[in-house]
């Protein structure tokens, strides 16, 4: 009985955690960059091949959308995620474009009402 309860708890916990970043992953997977950038916090630490600094959400949106448009997004896959317990969450992924393959790093906070990306990195693999 203990093992059954533990197994159900574990499965339920994993499903809840997996849903926490699905909006971010799905927006990149479906190439909906406008939706993805709508999660940017008011200021964001942005580190992409064409820009490296802290930007306002509007500046960062323009820079990311231009980079993705110029690179021509083909696919996105989540490779690892974690965090929580009072700390920000993170997701590491693989962004495939016509100009090459990139590793992504997304640091975000989730509240009951919203998800906010506080850091976004794209690095050439």
Image (spheres, rainbow, N blue to C red):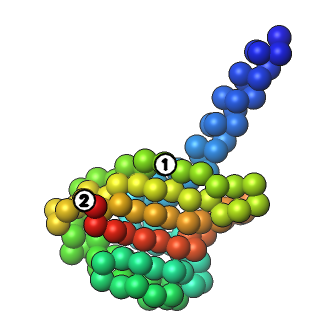
What kind of element bears circle 1? Answer: strand
In the rendered image, residue 5, in percent from the top left (x then y), is placed at 79, 20
Q: Which residue lies under the disc numbered 2? A: 101
Relative to 23, does residue 72 appear above or below in the rendering? below
Which one is in front, 116 or 121? 121
Which of the 4 image quarters holds residue 89?
A: bottom right
In the rendered image, residue 21, in percent from the top left (x then y), is placed at 56, 53
In the rendered image, residue 93, in percent from the top left (x then y), is placed at 41, 55
Query: From this viewpoint, which residue is outermost toward the top?
Result: 1
Q: Which residue lies under the disc numbered 1? A: 80
Relative to 50, does residue 31 appear above or below in the rendering? above
- Badge 1: few (under 14), some or many (20 or more) residues near its Cα, within 10 Å? few
Q: Earlier in the sequence, mark 2 or mark 1?
A: 1
**How far, Cα to Cα, is label 2 from label 1?**
16 Å
Which disc, if any, is residue 110? none
Q: In which quadrant will I find the C terminus?
A: bottom left
Relative to 57, does residue 26 appear above or below in the rendering? above
Instruction: Tell me what residue is drawn at x 59 percent, y 46 percent.
Output: 19
Q: Is residue 77 left or right of residue 1?
A: left
Q: In which quadrant will I find the N terminus?
A: top right
């Amino acid at each position: 009985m203990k093992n059954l309860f533990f197994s159900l708890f574990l499965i339920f916990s994993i499903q809840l955690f997996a849903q926490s970043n699905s909006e971010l992953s799905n927006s990149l997977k479906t190439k909906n960059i406008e939706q993805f950038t709508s999660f940017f916090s008011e200021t964001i630490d942005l580190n992409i091949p064409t820009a490296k600094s802290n930007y306002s959400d509007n500046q960062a949106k323009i820079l990311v959308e231009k980079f993705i448009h110029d690179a021509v997004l083909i696919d996105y896959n989540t490779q690892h995620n974690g965090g929580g317990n009072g700390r920000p969450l993170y997701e590491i992924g693989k962004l495939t474009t016509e100009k090459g393959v990139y590793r992504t790093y997304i640091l975000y906070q989730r509240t009951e009402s919203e998800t906010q990306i506080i850091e976004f990195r794209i690095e050439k693999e």
